[in-house]
Amino acid sequence: ETQKETLGFQTEVKQLLHLMIHSLYSNKEIFLRELISNASDAEDKLRFAALKDDSLFENEPDLKIRLDYDKEANTVALTDNGIGMSRDDVIQNLGTIARSGTAEFLSQLTGDEKKDSKLIGQFGVGFYSAFIVADRVEVFTRRAGTPIEDGVHWESTGDGEFTIESVERPARGTQIVLHLKPDASEFADGWRLRNLVKKYSDHISFPVVMKAESEDDKEGEAEDETVNEATALWTLPRTEIKEEEYKGFYKHIAHDFEDPLTWSHNKVEGKLDYTSLLYIPARAPFDLYNREAPRGIKLYVQRVFIMDHAEQFLPLYLRFVKGVVDSNDLSLNVSREILQNDSTVENIKTALTKRVLDMLAKLAKKEPEQYQKFWDEFGTVMKEGPAEDFSNREKIGGLLRFASTHTGEPAQNVSLADYIGRMKDGQTKIYYITADNFTAAKSSPHLEIFRKKGVEVLILSDRIDEWMMGYLTEFDGKQLQDVARGELDLGEVETEEDKKHQEEATEAHKGLLERIKTALDDRVQEVRVTNRLTESPACLVVGDYDMGAQMKKIMEAAGQ
Ligand code: ADP
Ligand code: MG
């Protein structure tokens, strides 16, 4: 009845394992953070499930994670008494990768270890990171609340296959045994392990215990000691938290190798009562544009973990934000359905959105170089903001960055405030041009008059730009004007003389205008004399309320 089965890993797992082992060699130590993170998640899940059914505690409500090592055997073992896994869970969780877009992601990897390690960092390696340090991994587990005979033993050497068999397992939860590679024996060491726990897992919510190190082994069984702080970081006062601790906690929740760009930690009391700790990552995940990609923050209610990826607390255009919200107002048995139309959630969302926008504004002001990094990674997502979040469009407008004729470079680093600071006397509008690409925009005849008058024009060439500008019509009381649209009104920058010249020319060329109009038939609405141009003989202009050229292409591509 304890039949042993041999199964193959899903192709994606094989690929990931292979690449990971080679490219994460210099980041070896992250395996412990990932495994402790899983153990902590499992404890969280048990505590949550036990809210409804406390028999799941099986008379052992003390949630903790144990870390053991054996120098002689060259092993490290991590044991949790969390939710555990059934046989089906094990096959599903430790044999496949469920994230959509994985295959495509893996195909982007180059074989260049340095580049790949960054990419894999964005992907998140999770359980499989065990194989960076171990040439054989064993998992013993039993799902809380199931019979002792339903324990599972999983084993693999990480090269394509794993075995799985039923075993008796009195303790609920999961034990992971790493048989370390000879060149990873440094991890079978109490000092090294303690250090890593402090570094990455100091502020997870559960104690990590180890046997106390004793000089003399003969004194009998060593005592257990807790080696981490084991208090959820966000519950501590800001003044008591070191920068390194904030960064460590970010890596724990985001599974990121890199430090975050910035964060914001706030305790709110009064009408709403919650704590939030929100981070801006330094790098976009591979599936930022994948609709099914998990997004959202971790939700806790009164310090009890409720769910991962609670997407109801931030708008879609801020989906890159990582963090935690811990509410005292929501009920412990809140579900995703309830979150969807709950007024408390709606209020927290409004507050967190403001928090994130303010955090970004602060970063832009105090650390413009860091902000530029943020913009380069997440700018196109921020551009969804004006349409999705009309009430914050002024704030979002302040965070946008554009290429501009001022720099003449494709880099998007000019803010609307920068632009306004350089506006000509008498100029009332913010001018921009949209095109398929930067070069096309920059050489557009529409820019001729602006060049002549020395008026700056923002250059927009991202796919989303024209659509965004449909929602961003004003900033700081100034209208945003597409230079290729309608009558061009340059305000007082245009002299009386310019206007007179245009009127005279229209009069003088009346006949010619008629002839062109007739020749082009109904392909154009109107033919006008313009002072937009200084070199080109003619240009096309879109009506004030017509669809722009870029938008037209998008609609056509969509079959409309
Ligand atoms: P992630 O944690 O991002 O989901 P991992 O690769 O780290 O990805 O883990 C895959 C899955 O395996 C987890 O989602 C969880 O369902 C399961 N798992 C891993 N470790 C444990 C554990 N210690 N206890 C229970 N389930 C676990
Ligand atoms: Mg994990």
Image (cartoon, rainbow, N blue to C red):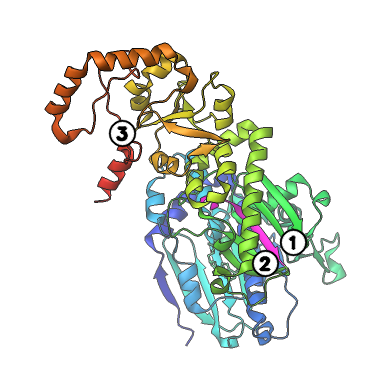
Residue drawn 78% across and 47% down? 242
Q: Is residue 406 visible?
A: no
Residue 280 picture location, percent across and down:
61, 46
Amino acid type for the residue under numbered disc 3:
Val
Crowdedness of circle 2 by 10 Å Cα count: few (<14), some, many (20+)?
many
Q: Is residue 427 above or below residue 99?
A: above
Q: Along the line of sight, which residue is nearer the eye, 197 or 325?
A: 325
Of the numbered discs in the image, which one, if any, rests on residue 542? 3
Residue 296 picture location, percent across and down:
56, 59
Label 2 SS: strand
Residue at the disc numbered 1: 232
Crowdedness of circle 3 by 10 Å Cα count: few (<14), some, many (20+)?
some
Label 3 SS: loop
Quadrant of the picture in which ligand 2 is shown: bottom right
The magenta span reads: 317-327
Mark 2–mark 3 distance (CA, rounded to whole Å): 52 Å
Q: Along the line of sight, which residue is nearer the eye, 358 or 416?
A: 416
